[in-house]
Image (cartoon, rainbow, N blue to C red):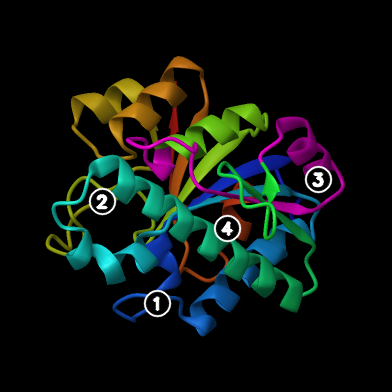
Amino acid sequence: MAAPVYKRILLKLSGEALMGNDSYGINRETIIGIVNEVKSITDMGVQVAIVIGGGNIFRGVAPGAAGMDRATADYMGMLATVMNALALQDAFRGVGVVSRVQSALTVEQVAEPYIRGKAIRHLEEGKVVIFGAGTGNPFFTTDTAAALRGMEMNAEVVIKATKVDGVYTDDPVRNPSASRYQTLTFDEAIQKNLKVMDATAFTLCRDHGMTLAVLGIFNPGALHRFVTGQDEGTIVRC
């Protein structure tokens, strides 16, 4: 079995990734598939931190949030990420993986507060750490939270897990001849106007030399192949 080339990673999961083919909410079969993908690399000793989004839950209340104050809506979205984090923790428990949820908002009855040193200790002990509530601040996306937590955790790479298996020259759904980039520099991604992450997260990673990767979370074995150095997804470096 190939040895992992990364010791510690930060995995960014969108809330939509938990929906499967449903219109909103959490699809149990999908979430079990995701935690098994993560388990395949924790079993090799890779330390995994996760930032989870909340779009799958917030989508269900979005019509009622129309015209709502932006900060209020963002706080609602943060609470949705905590719900997803708890669902992930429960799914990890089901496959025998110990995990901890840390929240940037204070919800002590269900999650630890975010404490950097404690989170790092959990990772060193082999536990998966799931970060909820984004950065704890409105107007910042969970992409930005992933970049921030990735640097705080001293992760070697921030992996954005999507429905697409990398960054392409064009939309691969509309253009079957589009080709996948194996590697890119941050400057190339900017010049080609490739939407890897939101601008704040992307700039944060570029300015601090954090490696980014984009891969398909629904491709069986993709995460395992990536951490063992195989050709999977797209890597963006300085």
- Alpha carbon separation for disc pair 2 and 4: 20 Å
* Mark 3 neighbour class, 10 Å CA radius: few under 14, some 14 to 19, many 20 or more: some
Give the label on residue 179, or none. Answer: 2
Residue visible at 57% across and 51% down? 226
* In this view, the mark in front (2 or 3): 3
Q: Can residue 185 be seen by looking at this rendering?
A: no
Where's residue 145, x and y in %?
A: 48, 38
Q: Which residues are magenta?
A: 114-143
Q: Is residue 10 left or right of residue 72?
A: right
Under mark 3, the amino acid is His
2 and 3 marks in contact (CB < 8 Å) = no
Residue type, numbered disc 2: Ser
Compared across the picture, whether 170 is left or right of 54 comes to: left
**Nearer the N terminus, badge 3 or badge 1?**
1
Mark found first going from the N terminus, 1 or 2: 1
Q: SS at mark 2?
A: loop
Q: Earlier in the sequence, mark 1 or mark 4?
A: 1
Q: CA distance from mark 1 to mark 2?
A: 25 Å
Q: Which residue in the protein does label 1 denote? A: 20
- Can you tell which of label 4 and label 3 is closer to the viewer? 3
Q: Which residue is mark 3?
A: 122
- Tell me, yes or no, if residue 186 can be seen here: yes
Q: Nearer the viewer, mark 1 or mark 4?
A: 1
